[in-house]
């Protein structure tokens, strides 16, 4: 069974650093890209970026470039989302998702993690 | 960046109603359009990919159509478990989500 299991909820202060994780199991981890998606409280979904675990190639949304870092350790079948300096505006639910694609190369996210709630407050 | 505009942002409907949600892209995205359902406190769930292909296990009352810039998600007969938020997503150039449509009980 394919599963993406994310790390638990975090409460941090502004300026602190944080790294959350997303562990894949039940499939060949290196074969499928991992996406990260943000959801602000009561708001919609925002694509943050993605990583190819086979070579750690990353691609970021311009809205998040430079503010977060996406990484992966294929030996641990785990992807990560990291902040060096959190802001209150980073308070949100964060989801990881596996990317698959159709014969016509249309990408889609077929499996999702359960989400990690990050709260940043002084 | 490709912008995705969903409409309506919310709607009220009754069990058994036919519901249609639209998604418009700021430029042509061919059929690189996916639909997701999200219930409160849960992760999104893939319903349709490639504009019209039903994901395995998704009930046939869900259908998708469109290509280019205009797309539609239709629920032929609303079930109680379908009250949720729905999002479109383009994967033609990077990734962008629509703003979402909340389907509420009338």
Image (cartoon, grey):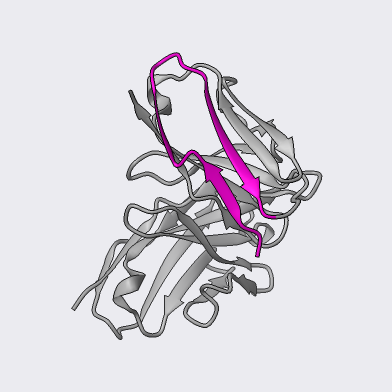
In the displayed structure, A120 sits above or below A115; it is below
The location of residue B10, given as percent across then percent down, is: 41, 37
Residue at far right of view: A104
Lateral position of residue B40 relative to residue B66, left or right: left
Q: Quadrant of residue B46?
A: top right
The location of residue A67, given as percent across then percent down, is: 47, 80
The location of residue B83, given as percent across then percent down, is: 39, 29
A108 vs B34, nearest the viewer: B34
In the displayed structure, B19 sits above or below A47; it is above
Lateral position of residue A105 relative to residue A80, left or right: right
Q: Quadrant of residue A88?
A: bottom left
A61 vs B20, nearest the viewer: B20
Q: Provide the residue span drawn in magenta.
A: B1-26
Count of numbered badges drawn on the protein? 0
Q: Can I make out residue A33 in this image?
A: yes
Name the residue: 36% across, 84% down.
Answer: A85
Instruction: Name the quarter where the C terminus of chain A is drawn.
Output: bottom left
Name the residue: 38% across, 39% down.
Answer: B39
Residue B23 in magenta stretch: yes
Residue at far left of view: A122
In the displayed structure, B55 sits above or below A7; it is above
Residue B10 in magenta stretch: yes
Q: Can I make out residue A1 in this image?
A: no
The location of residue A73, given as percent across then percent down, is: 55, 72
């Amino acid at each position: 069974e394919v599963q993406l299991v994310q790390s638990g909820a975090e409460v941090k202060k502004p300026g602190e650093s944080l790294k959350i994780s997303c562990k894949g199991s039940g499939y060949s981890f290196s074969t499928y890209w991992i996406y990260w998606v943000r959801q602000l409280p009561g708001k919609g979904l925002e694509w943050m970026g993605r990583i190819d675990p086979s070579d750690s190639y990353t691609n970021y949304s311009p809205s998040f470039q430079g503010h977060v870092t996406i990484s992966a350790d294929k030996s641990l079948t785990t992807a990560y989302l990291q902040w060096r300096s959190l802001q209150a505006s980073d308070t949100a639910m964060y989801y990881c998702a596996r990317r698959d694609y159709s014969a016509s190369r249309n990408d889609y996210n077929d499996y999702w993690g359960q989400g990690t709630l990050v709260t940043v407050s002084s | 960046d490709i912008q995705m505009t969903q409409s309506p942002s919310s709607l009220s409907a009754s069990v058994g109603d036919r519901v249609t949600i639209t998604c418009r892209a700021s430029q042509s995205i061919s059929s690189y359009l996916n639909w997701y359902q999200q219930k409160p406190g849960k992760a999104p769930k893939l319903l349709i990919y490639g504009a019209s292909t039903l994901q395995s296990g998704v009930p046939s009352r869900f259908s998708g159509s469109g290509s280019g810039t205009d797309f539609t998600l239709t629920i032929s007969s609303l079930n109680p478990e379908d009250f949720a938020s729905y999002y479109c997503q383009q994967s033609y150039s990077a990734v962008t989500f629509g703003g979402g449509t909340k389907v509420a009980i009338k």
